[in-house]
Amino acid sequence: MINIKEIIAKEIEKVTKLNSNELESYIEKPKEVKNGDYAFPCFRLAKELKKAPQEIAKEIASNINISKEVIENVEVVGGYLNFYANKNLLTNEVIKEISSKEEVGSSNIGNGKTIVIDYSSPNIAKPFHIGHLKTTVLGGALYNIYKHLGYKVIGVNHLGDYGTQFGKLIEGYKRWGDEYDLTKDPIDKLAEIYLKINNLCAEDEEVLNKCRENFKLLENGDEYCTNLWNKKYNPIRPMLLVTIILIILLSLALIKVIVKGKFFDCKIKTVEQFHDAIWNNAHEFIFFDRPDFSCSENKLLYSV
């Protein structure tokens, strides 16, 4: 891969007559993109050349001769020389480097070593939040990096569905739980209960001990605690499934009415006629039963 720092150093060497290897070691990477891709601090040469850094920078800038294919522009900023590399050159060099290797950036420094990466590991007694997404993405990135370096990587995302927090939820449910509210809005209601009991535990050690006892009962298989822990509140899912199925069937019926041409063969004069055509075709899809209707001046052919 082309060494742009080396090219810059050799050009500066021609002007200053100083050693290019030493000059190359002075070249920096600017902190801000607006200051270019490479920067040369001319104050490093002030003592040896017995000139002001800004004067040195201007002299070098006016005398160096680097191809535009390598360096597009050179700017003097105070006692610095800022070099702007040709982006097409950099892009092509990176692509060439990547294409020439099967595993770019890989190594075997992790061979024989194991590392465990923990992701978000949420406490599911509370709602998820954006922080869980952030740590999961970071964990995934670290997993890939370590794997690329030869480590045996174990990814862990422990769901915190067991522990004192559930002893707290059980205690909170005993105090403020409402079966109807949990069925209607389980996540928000349980979060509300958890927050309330957690605050109470912070104020009263006796309440915290009861929560610990609840979890101990859960560990020992207590029927009430186990049933409560296993309880699922999800009334929406079956309704959602039925709704999706109905939408699919009605869509198929509509497509059949239109594509088969009966939509156009019969004179649809009312919304009710169109409604009946759709529902009768949906009936056929569900029960595999074709109603025997015919098209007339006053009646739509309901099944096609």
Image: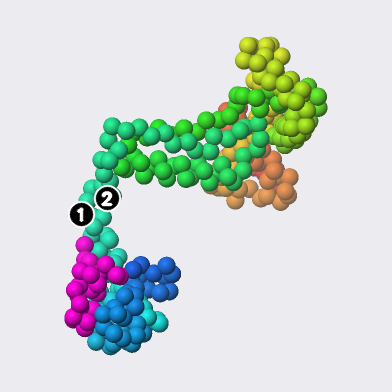
Marks 1 and 2 sit apart, C-alpha to C-alpha, by 9 Å
Can the viewer see residue 258? Answer: yes
**Mark 1: amino acid:** Ser
Circle 1 or circle 2, nearest the eye: 2
Vertically, is 290 above or below 49?
Answer: above
The stretch drawn in magenta includes residue 6: yes
Vertically, is 161 above or below 226?
Answer: below
Quadrant assignment, res 126: top right
The residue carrying pointer 1 sits among few (fewer than 14), some (14 to 19) or many (20 or more) residues within 10 Å by Cα, namely: few
Magenta stretch in the rendered image: 1-27
**Front position in the image: 225 or 302:** 225
The residue carrying pointer 2 sits among few (fewer than 14), some (14 to 19) or many (20 or more) residues within 10 Å by Cα, namely: few
Quadrant assignment, res 254: top right
**Count of numbered circles in the view:** 2
Question: Residue at left 63%, top 11%?
Answer: 220
**Mark 2: amino acid:** Val
Question: Residue at left 29%, top 70%?
Answer: 26
> Where residue 98 appears, x then y in whole percent?
26, 55
> Where residue 23 appears, x then y in whole percent?
24, 72
**Front position in the image: 115 or 242:** 115
Q: Are marks 1 and 2 in contact (CB under 8 Å)?
A: no
Vertically, is 243 above or below 271?
Answer: above
> Where residue 160 appears, x then y in whole percent?
58, 29
User: Which element type, helix, strand or loop, lies under badge 1?
Assistant: loop
Q: Which mark is residue 104?
A: 2
The stretch drawn in magenta includes residue 4: yes
**Front position in the image: 207 or 118:** 207
| Image quadrant in which the N terminus is located | bottom left
Vertically, is 72 above or below 145?
Answer: below
**Front position in the image: 267 or 135:** 135
Question: Residue at left 53%, top 46%?
Answer: 134
